[in-house]
Each structure stands twice: as structure tokens, then as C-alpha cells.
């Protein structure tokens, strides 16, 4: 139990994701122990997100940093992924996740936490160097992004620009 509290303490003090390997090193245990601890904490409703860069605590917006959230339904070619992500962050958005609706498995959801152009570039680079396909490959390109922003105006701008670029799927 004490180790799990230390995991939360480490994650709450970090602004960037912390890898399972780094947590294991700091706590003197194996990476697998960290993975198991995180799974148990999630089962207890601790909001720990897994990103391709490591673990982060979901931050609840406070009074001083109110967030507005919108889900966008998108489709585009894989080579347009960077443009889509940069459009979101350039207009003040923070990309929280990607999800798809799979015919057999239902909703598949992955936390991304892309806050700026560098995050977007690193994500696309990881996609390009991986032998795996993006989630959207399972649904002929259709996917959903949850985006947070500081204002409805920013979300409206993001939506308009994604529409202008042909990335939005009209419902």
C-alpha cells in the first residue's frame, strides 16, 4: 500500500509522464510490479492514465484553470495525422485521447495527452517507427478525439479548422 501512495506522490509532482521503468527504478521494484500496482489503483478508481511516454495522473480542473471538453469524430489518411494533431494544439487544444467504435470489441480507448507541437511530433514519429498500425486502421479511418481547451471559443476554432481541412466526419 505504501508503494502505491509513493507512485501517486511521484506522479502528482511531475509535469511530464513517468515511465514504468523510471517508477520501478525510483521505488526499487520491477516494472511488472509497477504495472500491477497501477492496475490495482485503477480498479480502486485512481485516475492514472497510460500514455506512450508513461503514466500521468488525470488532473481535475480547478477554479483557476477551468477546462471545456469536446469530442470530435475524425477521418483522414495516416500521413495527415500530424496536421490533425497540430491543428488541435495550435488553436489551444489539449488532445486527451483517441477512441474507436469497433464492431466486435466495442469502444477501444487510448489516452494520448498531446499538449503541444513537440508532443504531436513525437507521437507521429512513434507511429512511423512502429510496425503497428494506428487504431483508426481498424475502422477505415474513423476515430474520435477528446479535446480540452480553456474556452468554448477555442473548441469552436478547432472544430472549424478541422472541418476546413476535411478531417471532421459530419454526424
Image (spheres, grey):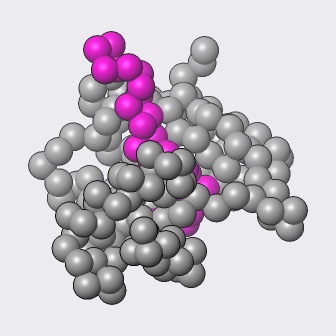
Using the image, determine if residue 83 lies above or below residue 76: below
> Residue 56 placed where, x, y %?
48, 65
* Residue 107 falls in image quadrant: top left
* Residue 17 falls in image quadrant: bottom left
Q: Can residue 132 be found in the magenta stretch?
A: no
Using the image, determine if residue 73 lies above or below residue 50: above
Q: Is residue 68 left or right of residue 106?
A: right
Q: Can residue 104 be found in the magenta stretch?
A: yes
| Highlighted range, magenta | 94-119
Q: Residue at x 24, y 66 (%)?
A: 33
Q: Residue at x 28, y 60 (%)?
A: 35
Q: Residue at x 50, y 49 (%)?
A: 44
Which residue is outermost to the right?
63
Q: Quadrant of the C terminus?
A: top right
The secondary structure that dominates the magenta segment is: strand
Which residue is outermost to the left?
131
Q: Residue at x 53, y 54 (%)?
A: 46
> Residue 101 placed where, x, y %?
41, 22
Camera-side residue of 162 and 109? 109
> Residue 133 placed where, x, y %?
21, 40
Camera-side residue of 147 and 21? 21
Is residue 84 in sight in this rendering?
Answer: no
Amino acid at each position: 500500500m505504501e508503494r502505491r501512495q509513493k507512485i501517486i506522490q511521484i506522479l502528482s509532482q511531475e509535469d511530464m509522464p513517468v515511465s514504468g521503468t523510471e517508477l520501478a527504478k525510483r521505488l526499487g521494484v520491477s516494472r511488472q510490479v509497477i504495472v500491477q500496482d497501477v492496475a490495482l489503483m485503477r480498479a480502486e478508481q485512481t485516475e492514472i492514465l497510460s500514455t506512450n511516454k508513461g503514466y500521468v495522473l488525470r488532473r481535475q480542473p480547478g477554479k483557476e484553470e477551468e477546462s471545456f471538453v469536446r469530442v470530435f469524430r475524425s477521418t483522414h489518411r495516416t500521413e495527415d495525422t500530424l496536421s490533425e494533431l497540430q491543428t488541435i494544439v495550435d488553436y489551444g487544444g489539449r488532445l486527451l485521447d483517441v477512441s474507436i467504435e469497433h464492431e466486435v470489441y466495442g469502444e477501444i480507448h487510448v489516452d494520448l495527452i498531446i499538449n503541444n507541437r513537440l508532443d504531436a511530433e513525437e507521437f507521429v514519429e512513434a507511429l512511423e517507427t512502429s510496425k503497428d498500425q494506428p487504431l483508426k486502421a481498424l475502422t477505415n479511418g474513423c476515430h474520435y478525439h477528446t479535446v480540452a481547451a480553456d474556452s468554448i471559443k477555442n473548441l469552436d476554432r478547432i472544430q472549424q479548422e478541422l472541418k476546413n481541412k476535411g478531417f471532421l466526419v459530419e454526424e
